[in-house]
Image: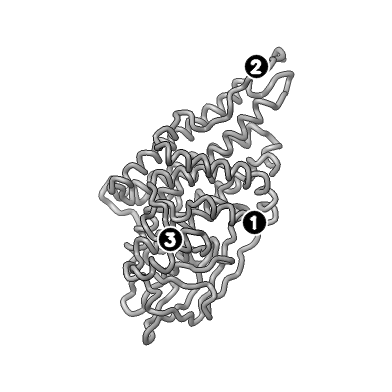
Amino acid sequence: MPKPVTAPATLPTANGDFYMVANTLSDEDNAIRLKVRLFMETEVEPIINDYWARDEFPFELLPKLQQLGIGGLPYEGYGCPGKTMMLMGFVMMEMARVDASMSTFFGVHTGLAMGSIVLCGSEEQKQKWLPPMAALTKVGSFGLTEPNVGSGTGGGLETTARRDGDGWILNGEKKWIGNSTWGDLTIIWARDVADNQVKGFIVENNTPGFKVEKIVTKMALRVVQNGHITMTDCRVSEANRMPGATSFRDTAKVLRMSRAAVAWESVGCATGAYEHALRYAQKRVQFGRPIASFQLVQDLLFRMLGNITSSQALCLRLSQMQEEGIMKDEHASLAKGICTVRMRETVGWAREVLGANGILLEHHIGRFVADAEALYSYEGTREMNALIVGKAVTGFSAFV
């Protein structure tokens, strides 16, 4: 039996930023990151397990989230802060470090919904929607995935749009649409029956013919309220059609931007699990000594920290490429695919450190393990991202 070990008077703080990547931010941007971290640690973490268990969203936090002033963080004008995509990545990481549901809510609203309007909307649409969305007084959703169409959205959307006089008639279904059960507007992507091209529409959720049912029995991201949308002769005006969305290539622009944010988000999820596991290992005593003093536990911590640090470096360079305007689909896909794989490994090892306690919500890690499964799949599965990268590096398309 190992000899008893007395813990040092002062133990190292659990810190997933081993290479100090936060130091690459300006003082002003770092202050925003720390403000988000404080909000997540003091307001979200104490209550999130209860909401996760009940499959509910903590609406009580919205006023405090609005006060952070981070809605539409990387966009210029229209009441948006006009910060960098780099800072957006750090904010997503900080949110997911405490709870991936809150980061997903924010990513869907700011990255996908607002991003669609920024990239594809008219000036009138930007003036109308972006200021209240930046203030988080209007909340958006992104309606792309369908019950029968997930990875195949590029060529097989079943939701249709038909021009009818001065408007459009939408028919079809969307599934897994975060924020849609209670939000104000949804970006709907539909196939125009006239030219068979994908078009984008801003649909207010109270529009006649637009019905949302909450998806229940989820095992992941339970705080996010995902909806199953059914549109039956749902009429929207021509003014709500985004003029910059005329094919799936335009949809892909939005996905390229948001995939980068999901890569950062997955790093945050892994970081949160690692830090909880480290703190637990420093305190948990077995065989007369803290388990953090055992070689096998230290090896697991080493592997987790290596995954996190290498993923941070990957995301850091990806954000730099975004700022330089040279990021392509394959760059975002590599980061999203690899970072989520490393996240999945890391949260699993974190649960391993805790043993049976790892499946208890009170230790948080079980929530990270479950939520990681959703991050691993949404915004493009690992396989789809692998094929995007594979086409770029070989010159051959392996898509069926």
Q: Disc 3 marks which amino acid? A: Met
User: In the image, which disc is placed on residue 300?
Assistant: none
Q: How is the image coloured?
A: one colour
The mark closer to the camera, 1 or 3, is: 1
Q: Disc 1 marks which amino acid? A: Glu
Where's residue 173, x and y in %? 50, 72
User: In the image, which disc is placed on residue 114?
Assistant: 3
Secondary structure of residue under mark 3? helix
- Tell me the residue at 39%/81% (across/down): 162
Quadrant that contains the C terminus: bottom left
Q: Is residue 110 left or right of residue 393?
A: right
Mark 1 / mark 3, whichever is N-terminal = 1
Above/below status of 171 relative to 31: below
Where's residue 327, x and y in %? 31, 47
Q: CA distance from mark 1 to mark 3?
A: 23 Å
Where's residue 261, x and y in %? 43, 48
- Tell me the residue at 68%/42% (across/down): 359
Mark 3 / mark 2, whichever is N-terminal = 2
User: In the image, which disc is placed on residue 60?
Assistant: 1
> Residue at label 2?
8
Nearer to us in this view, 86 or 232 = 86
- Tell me the residue at 43%/60% (across/down): 114
Secondary structure of residue under mark 2? loop
